[in-house]
Image (cartoon, rainbow, N blue to C red):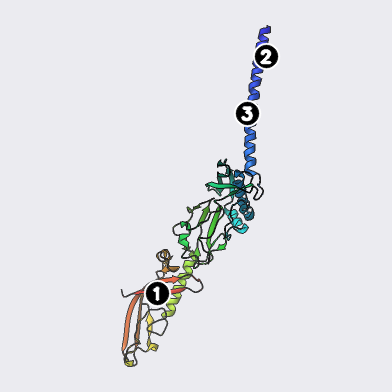
Amino acid sequence: MTQQNDAATSRKLRRAGIVRIVLVGLLAVALAITGLVWHSTRPIPPGQAKTAEQSVLGYLQAVAQGSASDALSFLDTVPTDTTFLTDDVLAYSRTFRPITHIKVSSAYGYNTKKTVNASYLIGDYRPFDSFNVILKEGYWVITNAPFGPTSEYYYYPFLTTVNSADISLNGVPLNGLNLSDISLFPGAYQYETSNRLLTMDGTTLLISGNRADTREIPPRWLSLTAEGQTEIADAVTSKLNDCLTEKASFTSCGFGFNWSNNDSQERNVDNSTVVWSTPSGIDDSNNLVVLDWMAIEDGGPLRAVAWIGGKVACEGTSAKGSLFMDSFRITTETIDVTDPDKLVITFFTSNY
């Protein structure tokens, strides 16, 4: 009986030992998880990263919290152009694509020069970045941030239209800026235009630690608003109608007949007798107005193309009673939309 009791007691002790081992293991895992969460959320004092990982964590935390000065304190060198490295620009990004879920991996490399990998979310976009860090005067700093788009392709389409389209990036006008000099913190950057005829809706640039992602910049990143199309079509129709009331064989719209350039006065038309007409009316039924992307991509003016027109006829007489008659077709128009309050309209004609 004593042997049975001893065996039962021994089994209980073994089970208790196993339970203690399991509990210790679970506690260790819990502590590790707790340490990871602390490591990912505890603020790092500005410019005082005591480890390589802290320099990257502190940098990304500062950007996520909207503090440009704190973010810059974790960099080895502050860029010369800080136009976009401001609290206001960061606040703009945070309103529609905040940075969250920052995760920093263990550093690897040499004693005073290491690489730190990090991931985070910009809205629902998750980049994976590698940061180069060095030990400098007792603290770790990042050497390959922020993103400097020197001669990067992502802004190339905007170069010829930045000024004419009044484009801004996160609320900062790009007019007059040297785009090859700007630097950008990680985050989402929204392109906009203040030209009321145009829109850049959905044109977003995603910047991670050291690269640009252009997946949200459509090939035709600039377009006319519906209201802009109507306004342009109305302006073209109005100008055309005004020109067709002019007492001139050659109108201010740039079309007509040179009936007043003859050597003999008898052969010149008397402009007071000139009458313009539209036998079939002006066709503006489709009000088709689009941006002239061929011109934009070739570095030309920011202009739209409209298909408003039809057959027009003109007749008049000379002082001697000679009759002048002719007709042609107005086919298309180009409209410089750089200044929406001063549209420059050019009419194109055909004899057929």
Q: Is residue 39 above or below residue 315?
A: above
Check if mark 3's residue and mark 1's residue have beta carbons within 8 Å.
no
Q: Is residue 301 above or below residue 100?
A: below
Looking at the image, residue 195 sits to the left or right of residue 318; the answer is right
Check if mark 3's residue and mark 2's residue have beta carbons within 8 Å.
no
Q: Nearer the viewer, residue 251 or 65?
A: 65
Q: How many badges with numbers are in the image?
A: 3
* Three-letter amino acid code at the position of disc 2: Thr
In the rendered structure, find residue 347 and report the number of the disc placed on it: 1
Label located before the other in sequence (1 or 2) = 2
Label located before the other in sequence (3 or 1) = 3
Front of the two marks 1 and 2? 2
Residue 191 appears at what percent x and percent y? 52, 60
Residue 253 appears at what percent x and percent y? 41, 78
Residue 240 appears at what percent x and percent y? 42, 76
Q: Nearer the viewer, residue 290 or 133?
A: 133
In the rendered structure, find residue 25 and report the number of the disc placed on it: 3
Q: Is residue 156 above or below residue 35?
A: below
How many angstroms separate mark 3 from mark 2 (CA)? 24 Å
